[in-house]
Image (spheres, grey):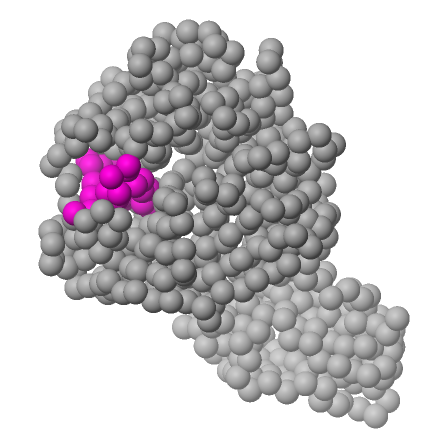
Amino acid sequence: MAGAASTATASATPNPATAVEVAATATSTVNTETLPFRVDSSNQAAWWKPIDLVGGVTYFAFNAPAAQASQHEVHLASRTAAGVWTEGCLRASSGAACSTFADDNGHNQPSIVVDGNGSIHAFVSMHNEQWNYFRSTVSGDVTTLVDRTAQMPDLDIDITYPVTARGPDGDAWLLVRTGTDADGAREGVLYHYDLDAGHWEREKVIAAAAGYAFYPDDLQVSSDGRVHVLWEWGPFPADPARHLGSYAVYDPATGIVRGVGGTTVATPVTPSSGGSVVWRAFGSGETIGSYTPAIQSAKLALNGTSLAGIAYRFVQKDQSAYDALFARWTGSAWSSETLVDVSALGTDVATSAAIDVTRAGTSTRVYTVVTAHVCGELRSQAVVAERIDGASGWTFATVGEQRLGQQRLRAETRSTDGADVVYLTAPNAAPAVVVRAGLPRSGPIGPAVPLADIVSALRGDPGGTNVAVGATVIASSSMRADTGPELAVDGVCTDASRWISAVGDTNPSIRLTLVEPTALDEVRVRSGYSADTGTSAVLRAFQIQVHSAAGWTTVGSYTTNTQRLVRSAVGGTVVDGVRLLITDPSTSATDVARVFEIEAIAVE
């Protein structure tokens, strides 16, 4: 951790210009508001807790850009009930520059909790590192957080994945993975901030086993003071694929840990402890080292003092995309149902490493992000699935807007009215953003939108019959044998199936001859590169021409293009050929044409 020039100090900013209301039902609306602050591309994780709600005040934490490359600052923002935002950064001491930390996606992200006295606690940027702990010096003031690491216990051990919660008495709780690794295990440890004592203490080693690594998922404290702990197991020392999803309840009054059915479980809990702790057991052929099937990310919701359910992501054996599921305790056994079955939604559809679940009144809501790869673009849409008690199924709706690149989220239920506040971030957007979404519970979150329709909208396929597939094609050049012009008319829209012109060909061209003359509605050109989330890899300046009995005719001319998909109307002309004449292939350092597909769409 090092000092850096401040990129953002305190500000108080009303943000009405970015507030958007989207009708959800006749009785409720979904409110989305983009925070008016700069956000870093490293602001992404699945385990984190970057949100807290106190009365009508919302607290968000996020990674913000630092002056140095591959570094970030950690900022906090608060929003009053009137919609006024205030921002501040973490500092080593009052008046010092904003502290900076190394980027590490999925690891170096913040978790926060506001205690009963209004002190804001922030645990940030720790991936097998010693504590980075900050606390506000003024109640509720996000501009006053300073380093208080020296006040933490266990200063000599490594910390990862801090997850936070506030108890009904105002005490703060913290779940982390710790480990010196000397014993061949990484443990799950619970810490407690006693409001009266004013300091953190190690409370209990919740779970540990030789050869295993503990992965915190979620932490909540029910109104009776019991601490509900959710985690997964992975092989020691670490692995992105996890197993044996586990849940236990710790009672601080007695020091006893119990399983979901009330059975006392000895601590530290191990993968073989029993007591119905494991809510997702090994499947056929699955071991702790299996890459599939596997779990990745889970969250819990309470119904009063009992577990309402667990939302989690699961990948089937020999698959790569994770489904979204909901698990609950029936009273005698664990039961899971699939909410998002990606295999049923078409190719290149998945859920991202973001999931949450809330419960209030008579409704349970599961939040996740659905993604689709479309011609080199990763598109994402946050969705909510809601089930009202007594209903037979789940109702889906969108949260926020479609984005290029991944999105991450967390959700919190407001105690005053049962509404959900969703922390939604798009770290790969240009620019990266954090969005606050408010979802009231004044009625169902519908109207019902089939998940297939949400995915169809995400794909954004304009439809039509593409008669360019299988056309004869020639080009002025190709970078390699595996980037030939035939890949621009094969109907496959991936990075591995693009025509790429040769370096040095400053005016590349490509011409195709249709299988037979056809009346065309339009020509579509898809260009770019999936790893480029900006516009530098798309075709910059070019003409689209069609060949008919009258010869070659220009139907589209572009000089400063920034779009991956370009559509030019043909108007029903019978065409036997299409060509691109390119005068500026791209604005990237490797200045070549990168064309996914040339599509000739027939008149219906």
Q: Which residues are magenta?
A: 109-137
Is residue 570 shown above or below 173? below
Q: Position of residue 38 (x, y in %)?
A: 34, 64
Residue at left 58%, top 44%?
441
Q: Is residue 568 visible?
A: yes
Q: Position of residue 570 (x, y in %)?
A: 78, 82
Residue at left 73%, top 66%?
462
| Quadrant location, the C terminus | bottom right
Residue 582 is left or right of residue 250, and the answer is right
Q: Quadrant of residue 223?
A: top left
Residue at left 31%, top 29%?
169
Residue 322 is left or right of residue 111, and the answer is right
- Magenta stretch: residue 123 in it? yes
Q: Is residue 293 visible?
A: no
Nearest the camera: 515 or 335?
335
Is residue 494 shown above or below 217? below
